[in-house]
Image (spheres, grey):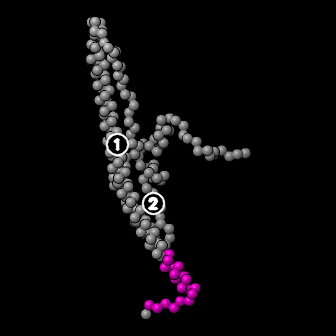
Amino acid sequence: QNVIIATPSTLIALLKTVAYGWRQAAVAKNAALIRELGQELYRRLGNFTGHLGRTGQRLGAAVEAYNAAVGSLERQVMPQARRFPELGVTPDAPLAQLDQIDHLTRTIAAQVSVDPPPVEPPSAGLSRAGSAPQQVDLPGTAAGADTATSDPQAALPYAQIKGEPAPRTGKSNARKA
């Protein structure tokens, strides 16, 4: 009739088992919440990188348009304007020299898709015995970084792409004799 005869030692063991089950339920609930928050953050990062990529493209287009305008000014307008002093026009100030912009925007190394890859629910990684959950490799982590993009320099820090030496960590791989 749902009555368990318990001695003090079996009661303590039973209470510890129930407490462990409650802790595991709380961990699973927190893991599900973290997963939902992670998916939302991943979606937002995808949107942000899309906006940032379009901004970079438009900045690049603006630089190209500016350089085309400066080239047109130098080729078509300035030669005639430089002839004015020869004709007796005395300018108050010399004409300013306009330089083309040679700095371009930096491209985003790896595009992040808006839809995150499917991930198992946290409870699916636990066996009935309560063993530890399986490790899941996410894009951009050490295991998934090589497959995220075909660009070999995408995984390198910006300083190394520019040819600057990597920062020293203070640890040496050489063995002391």
Q: What's the mark number on residue 136? A: 2
Q: Is residue 25 above or below residue 113?
A: below
Residue 121 drawn at (x, y percent): 40, 66
Name the residue nearer the viewer: 124 or 103: 103
The answer to whether residue 13 is above or below residue 165 is below
The residue furthest right is: 177
Residue at position x 46%, y 69% from top? 27
The magenta-colored residue range is 2-20
Q: What secondary structure is marked by label 1?
A: helix
Secondary structure under tag 2 reads loop
- Is residue 97 in view from this perspective? yes
Identify residue type, mark 2: Val
Assess disc 2: are there few (<14), some (14-19) or many (≥20) residues with their C-alpha within 10 Å of its C-alpha.
Answer: few
For the point 57% across and 87% down, the residue is 8
Q: Position of residue 151 (x, y in %)?
A: 42, 42
Q: Earlier in the sequence, mark 1 or mark 2?
A: 1
Front-most of residues 2 and 80: 80
Dominant SS in magenta: helix
Of tags 1 and 2, the one toward the viewer is 1
Determine which of the numbered discs, if any, sits on residue 53 in the image.
1
Q: Is residue 7 magenta?
A: yes
Q: Identity of the amino acid at label 1?
A: Gly
Q: Is residue 107 left or right of residue 90?
A: right
Binning the other alpha carbons within 10 Å of mark 1 as few (below 14), some (14 to 19) or many (20 upward) gives some
- Of residues 171 and 70, which is closer to you in this image? 70
Q: As rendered, which of 38 and 163 lies closer to the eye?
A: 38
Residue at mark 1 to residue at mark 2: CA–CA distance: 29 Å
